[in-house]
Image: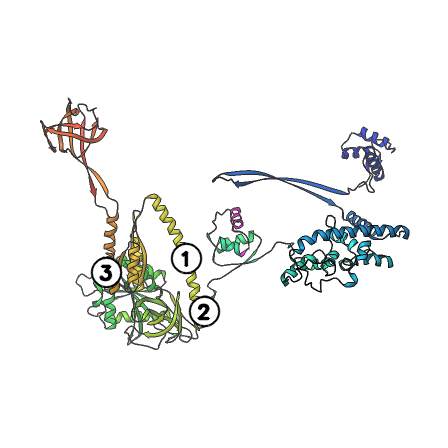
């Protein structure tokens, strides 16, 4: 600090200038005036004078404090549950902390000073021999008396537990260290004799030296080893353990002594005499980390809050607090996404690594398939129901599939490959019914060309528009086939006009869509249609690798009673061979048999060829991808991983559904129609489930308890009975055991072959579950002409029925000036003096209104009835 003037110094110190000048004068420091400069030495002299005048001590360096003490108080509250249930108390807690900070230089001086004091205390001071010997003899005698008293007090409880017959030689004191009786009487020990012969050593600096001196000098070593308040030492304990130290009681020499007891007694005896070095070796090796632990957290695509807390080794409440700070309200079991979990991990100071759960699948899909070669086109026949799709395909294949279909409509997706003179073409026949939307969507995604069949006499219909949308979503070219051209009502121009409205413009009108006019019945235009399909496929330049692992898509799957799960697969690349290990969705297995659409066995299938395979572990979902893998281990690993993901998704969905159920219970919406569904193929089951779920309304809903493929068995009947569900079989039947059980339980089995009949029956059942709705209908109106007093009924009204009919059993309303003033019922209805049940228009009558006496002339009595209204979905 530079020199300052007196005025500036007074401003810094915060006292008046006159008072500062007086203090300088009292300290004997000469200052010229207010503007005079003062030096650092003058400031120190003034401070020394002020400390001396206030009674303070002088420091070597008055400008620096020696130590600083900080005190801190913190207040908090905790909530404690009382003895009685529901009682909570709030307790205030005050924590006081005191911490003193000292300079390191002063700490070094204090340490050096204390070390010097200890050295001085342990360094022996030479004492004249004539003074030392009487003092040593007196101290030894007192120590001997004290040890004898302790041994006598210890002998009483010790002899009741330990016999004196056998003593471990390792614990027995050596003979030259055992004090004799004369020495014990005189109070002289070997340590005293050795102390007379040689001067005591210097102060010990290690624990090992102290350990050696303890058994040799019981008198002095005991005080150092045990400390104040503990007078027992290790030396006398060893002396007491020797056989000649004290006589044993008669008859106890033969008492058995187990090794366990002797070990425990030996450990108790030598506990106080253990060296400090061994205690240091037994000290726990854990050291508190000086920095926070930073963990690498592996984050999957979804993770629960509990699992995230376990990965970071913290409590779940800490993670929830972190989310609250981030502005998110989460619960302990809530599943969060990967990005949200990453933000929480960063907020808590850890690092994360994002896991790609489909890494195995991507590695499997990345395997090379070899050189790409031309492949046949895959053509999907789409259109509205009953527009002739299957009949057109039958004429191409020279078969009669349409004649054997239930209800005359296609309800399954079919896959066929046809060898024509112009090349091989694979056809996918899709259903046209509205319920098979998902099936048509899969057909559009797995195809190269879409043939849109439109009836010339019917035009564009709803499923025609849907097929156009599916084709555009899959970015697939469309070839239009205008069917039923042999009918007299055929109008192809109308069809082209309606298609152009939807953006499908023919080449004749300047568009890019090929249109063929065909007749599936007579075969007209079929060859032209095939030519257009092949031309479109050549433009697309369809190619796929032939060698390498096979890849494809599941067109349909079903459960065959004799062969097990059967899947129809369209191979898209590679070659599928009999014996290959394949993986499809959550199912895997080895191809045990492979059949074409005609039921003939084949050994391999190349690109664009549909086949039926047997050997999977279960029925895969229609639309799942199929891939051939190298070994079974990899297939099982991926399948189990997919099953785990599916279970997590189902558990999350069930939790959400449970919340919906609770909400409906609170709102009073409890009408639920439970259904157990068994179908012949996976695609039909999926279409029925989707159609039934769309029937649900706010008042009644359909709940699919279970759905599957295959025949109805005993477990299906038990499930339907337990859940009070309707058991439906679509193109399947129940076995004998299931039929017998259903008859015993009174459960009706419902069989269907056509999907719209099934949907209509479920609609009727849901209508029957709706709450009845009533409508009020006015049936008569009477005018009050006079009011009379009756001793039996009180007030009676003389009325004229002006409209309809008045019935005694019907409810009424009393209107005054066209305003309802009372609602109730009639107590009596009389014509003259006779009781009647009804009175028609134009007739006078007398009425008694129940619990109402304020009837006046000019009022109108309105009679009505409640009529139930037929409800629909």
According to the picture, the residue beneath numbered tag 1 turns out to be 649
Q: Tell which circle, 3 or 1, labels the residue nearer the N-terminal end.
A: 1
In what element is the residue under mark 1?
helix
According to the picture, the residue beneath numbered tag 3 turns out to be 751
Tell me, yes or no, whether the highlighted magenta stretch contains residue 316. Answer: yes
Image location (x, y in percent) of residue 290? 65, 54
Q: Nearer the viewer, residue 837 or 410?
A: 837
In what element is the residue under mark 2?
helix
Dominant secondary structure, magenta: helix
Q: Tell which circle, 1 or 2, labels the residue nearer the N-terminal end.
A: 2
- For this orientation, the residue located farthest to the front is 250
- Which quarter of the figure has residue 514? bottom left
Q: Nearer the viewer, residue 413 or 181?
A: 181
Q: Residues within 10 Å of mark 2 (few under 14, many from 20)?
A: some
- The alpha-carbon separation of the residues under discs 1 and 2 comes to 23 Å
Image location (x, y in percent) of residue 535? 32, 71
Image location (x, y in percent) of residue 691? 29, 56
In what element is the residue under mark 3?
strand
According to the picture, the residue beneath numbered tag 2 turns out to be 364
Disc nearest the viewer among 3 and 2: 3
Image location (x, y in percent) of residue 836? 11, 32
Count all numbered tags in the image, as a single digit: 3
């Amino acid at each position: 600090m530079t020199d300052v003037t007196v005025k500036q110094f007074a401003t810094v110190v915060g006292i008046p200038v006159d008072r500062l000048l007086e203090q300088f004068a009292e300290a004997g420091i000469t200052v010229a005036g207010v503007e005079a400069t003062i030096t650092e030495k003058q400031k120190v002299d003034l401070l020394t004078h002020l400390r001396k005048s206030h009674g303070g001590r002088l420091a070597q360096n008055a400008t620096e404090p020696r130590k600083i003490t900080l005190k801190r108080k913190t207040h908090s509250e905790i909530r404690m549950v009382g003895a009685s249930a529901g009682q909570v108390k709030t307790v205030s807690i005050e924590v006081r902390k005191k911490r003193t900070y000292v300079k390191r230089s002063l700490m070094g001086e204090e340490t050096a000073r204390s070390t010097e004091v200890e050295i001085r205390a342990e360094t022996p001071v030479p004492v004249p021999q004539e003074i030392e010997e009487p003092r040593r003899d007196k101290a030894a005698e007192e120590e001997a008396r004290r040890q004898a008293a302790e041994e006598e007090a210890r002998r009483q409880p010790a002899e009741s537990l330990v016999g004196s017959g056998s003593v471990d030689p390792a614990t027995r004191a050596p003979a030259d260290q055992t004090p004799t009786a004369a020495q014990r009487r005189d109070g002289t020990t070997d340590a005293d004799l050795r102390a007379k012969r040689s001067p005591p050593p210097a102060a010990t600096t290690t624990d090992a030296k102290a350990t050696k001196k303890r058994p040799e000098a019981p008198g002095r070593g005991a005080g150092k080893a045990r400390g104040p308040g503990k007078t027992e030492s290790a030396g006398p304990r060893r002396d007491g353990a020797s056989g000649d130290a004290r006589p044993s009681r008669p008859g106890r020499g033969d008492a058995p002594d187990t090794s366990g007891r002797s070990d425990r007694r030996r450990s108790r005896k030598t506990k106080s005499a253990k060296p400090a070095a061994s205690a240091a070796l037994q000290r726990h090796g854990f050291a508190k980390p000086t920095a926070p632990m930073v963990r690498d957290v592996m984050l999957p695509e979804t993770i629960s809050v509990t699992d995230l807390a376990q990965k970071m080794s913290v409590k779940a409440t800490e993670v929830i607090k972190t989310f609250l700070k981030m502005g998110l309200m989460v619960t302990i079991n809530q599943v969060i996404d990967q990005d949200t979990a990453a933000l929480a991990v960063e907020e808590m100071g850890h690092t994360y690594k994002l896991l790609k759960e489909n890494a195995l699948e991507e590695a499997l899909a990345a395997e090379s398939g070899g050189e790409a070669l031309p492949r046949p086109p895959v053509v999907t026949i789409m259109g509205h129901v009953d527009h002739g799709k299957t009949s057109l395909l039958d004429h191409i294949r020279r078969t009669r599939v349409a004649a054997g279909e239930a209800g005359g409509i296609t309800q399954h997706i079919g896959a066929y490959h046809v060898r024509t003179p112009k090349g091989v073409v694979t056809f996918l026949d899709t259903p046209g019914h509205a319920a098979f939307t998902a099936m048509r969507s899969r057909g559009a995604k797995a195809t190269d060309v879409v043939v849109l069949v439109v009836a010339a006499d019917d035009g564009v219909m709803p499923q025609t528009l849907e097929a156009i949308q599916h084709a555009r979503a899959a970015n697939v070219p469309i070839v239009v086939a205008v069917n039923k051209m042999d009918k007299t009502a055929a109008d192809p121009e109308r069809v082209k006009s309606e298609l152009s409205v939807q953006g499908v413009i023919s080449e004749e009108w300047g568009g890019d869509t090929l249109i063929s006019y065909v007749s599936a019945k007579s075969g007209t235009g079929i060859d032209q249609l095939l030519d257009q399909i092949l031309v479109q496929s050549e433009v697309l330049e369809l190619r796929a690798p032939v060698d390498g692992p096979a890849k494809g898509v599941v067109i349909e799957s079903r459960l065959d009673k004799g062969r097990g799960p059967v899947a129809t697969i369209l191979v898209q690349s590679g070659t599928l061979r009999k014996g290959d290990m394949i993986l499809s969705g959550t199912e895997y297995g080895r191809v045990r048999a492979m059949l074409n659409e005609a039921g003939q066995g084949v050994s391999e299938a190349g690109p664009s060829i549909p086949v039926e395979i047997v050997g999977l572990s279960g029925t895969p979902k229609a639309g799942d991808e199929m891939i051939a893998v190298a070994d079974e281990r990899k297939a099982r690993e991926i399948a189990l991983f997919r099953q785990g993901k599916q279970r997590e998704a189902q558990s999350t969905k069930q939790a959400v559904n449970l919340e919906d159920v609770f909400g409906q219970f609170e709102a009073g919406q409890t009408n639920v129609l439970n259904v157990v569904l068994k179908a012949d193929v996976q695609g039909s089951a999926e279409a029925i489930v989707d159609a039934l779920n769309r029937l649900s309304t706010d008042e009644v809903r359909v709940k699919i308890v279970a759905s599957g493929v295959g025949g109805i068995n005993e477990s299906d009947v038990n499930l339907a009975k337990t859940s009070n569900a309707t058991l439906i079989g679509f193109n399947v039947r129940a076995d004998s055991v299931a039929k017998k059980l259903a008859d015993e339980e009174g459960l009706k089995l419902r069989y269907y072959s056509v999907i719209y009949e099934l949907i209509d029956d479920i609609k009727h059942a849901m209508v029957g579950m709706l709450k009845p709705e009533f409508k009020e209908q006015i049936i008569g109106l009477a005018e009050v002409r006079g009011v009379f007093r009756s001793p039996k009924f009180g007030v009676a009204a003389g009325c004229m029925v002006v409209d309809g009919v008045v019935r005694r059993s019907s409810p009424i309303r009393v209107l005054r000036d066209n305003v309802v003033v009372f609602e109730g019922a009639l107590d009596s209805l009389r014509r003259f003096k006779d009781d009647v049940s009804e009175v028609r228009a134009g007739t006078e009558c007398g009425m008694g209104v129940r619990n109402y006496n304020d009837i006046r002339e000019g009022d109108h009595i309105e009679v009505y009835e409640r009529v139930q209204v037929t409800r629909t979905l």
